[in-house]
Image (cartoon, rainbow, N blue to C red):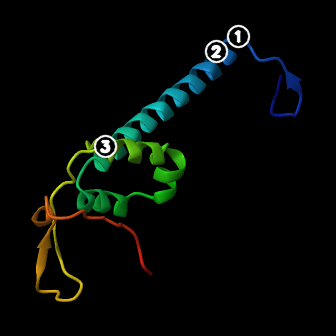
C-alpha cells in the first residue's frame, strides 16, 4: 500500500514493485562492490611493510576498517608469517640498551647459549 499526494491509500502496481525491487537490487550490488573493493584494498595494504600500511591507514577512517570489515582476522592472515615450531628465528640487529652506539646481532649468539626474545612494552 502507498499513499497519494492527498493522503489516500492506494495499491502499488506490479511495475512500481518491480522498479522498487530493481532499485534495491542495484543499491545492494553497488554496496557489495564497494565492500569488495575496500576489502581488497585493505588486504593489499596489510601485506605491505609496516611503514606503507601505516601510510595507508593514515588516510583511511579507522572505524570503517576495524568496524566495517573483519580486519582483525585479515590482519592475522596478512601477518601470519612462515615460521614453524623449532625453526630458526629471523636474524636482526639492534642497538644495545647500555651503549646506544653499539649493535648486537641475533645470529652472533647461535650455538653459544639459549636466547629468549621478549616482545612487549615496559611502559
Reply above or below: 15 against 81.
above
Badge 3, how many Cα within 10 Å: few under 14, some, many 20+? few
User: Is 15 or 113 nearer to us in this picture?
Assistant: 113
* Residue found 64% across the figure and 15% down from its top: 18
Label 1 residue SS: helix
User: Is 95 or 86 nearer to us in this picture?
Assistant: 86
Label 2 residue SS: helix
Reply above or below: 115 against 73.
below
Q: Answer whether labels 3 and 1 touch (C-beta < 8 Å).
A: no
**Image coords of residue 35 (percent x, y):** 45, 37
Q: Which residue is outermost to the front?
A: 112
> Mark 2 — residue?
18
Dot placed on the residue nearer the N-terminal end, 3 or 2: 2
Q: Answer whether labels 3 and 2 touch (C-beta < 8 Å).
A: no
* Residue found 29% across the figure and 56% down from its top: 53
Q: Answer whether labels 2 and 1 touch (C-beta < 8 Å).
A: yes
* Residue found 23% across the figure and 55% down from its top: 49
User: Is 80 or 24 nearer to us in this picture?
Assistant: 80
Badge 1, how many Cα within 10 Å: few under 14, some, many 20+? few
* Residue found 19% across the figure and 81% down from its top: 96
Q: Is residue 113 left or right of residue 34?
A: left
Gap between marks 2 and 1 measured at Cα? 6 Å
Picture quadrant where residue 60 is located: bottom left
> Mark 1 — residue?
14
**Image coords of residue 109 (percent x, y):** 14, 65
Picture quadrant where residue 99 is located: bottom left
Gap between marks 3 and 2 measured at Cα? 59 Å
> Mark 3 — residue?
85
User: Is 1 or 60 nearer to us in this picture?
Assistant: 60
Amino acid at each position: 500500500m502507498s499513499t497519494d499526494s492527498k493522503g489516500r491509500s492506494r495499491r502499488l502496481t506490479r511495475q512500481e514493485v518491480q522498479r522498487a525491487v530493481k532499485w534495491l537490487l542495484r543499491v545492494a550490488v553497488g554496496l557489495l562492490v564497494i565492500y569488495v573493493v575496500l576489502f581488497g584494498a585493505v588486504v593489499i595494504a596489510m601485506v605491505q611493510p609496516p611503514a606503507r600500511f601505516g601510510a595507508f591507514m593514515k588516510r583511511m577512517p579507522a572505524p570503517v576498517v576495524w568496524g566495517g570489515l573483519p580486519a582483525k582476522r585479515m590482519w592475522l592472515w596478512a601477518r601470519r608469517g612462515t615460521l614453524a615450531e623449532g625453526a630458526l628465528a629471523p636474524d636482526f640487529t639492534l642497538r644495545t640498551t647500555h651503549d646506544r652506539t653499539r649493535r648486537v646481532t641475533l645470529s652472533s649468539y647461535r650455538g653459544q647459549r639459549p636466547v629468549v626474545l621478549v616482545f612487549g612494552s615496559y611502559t
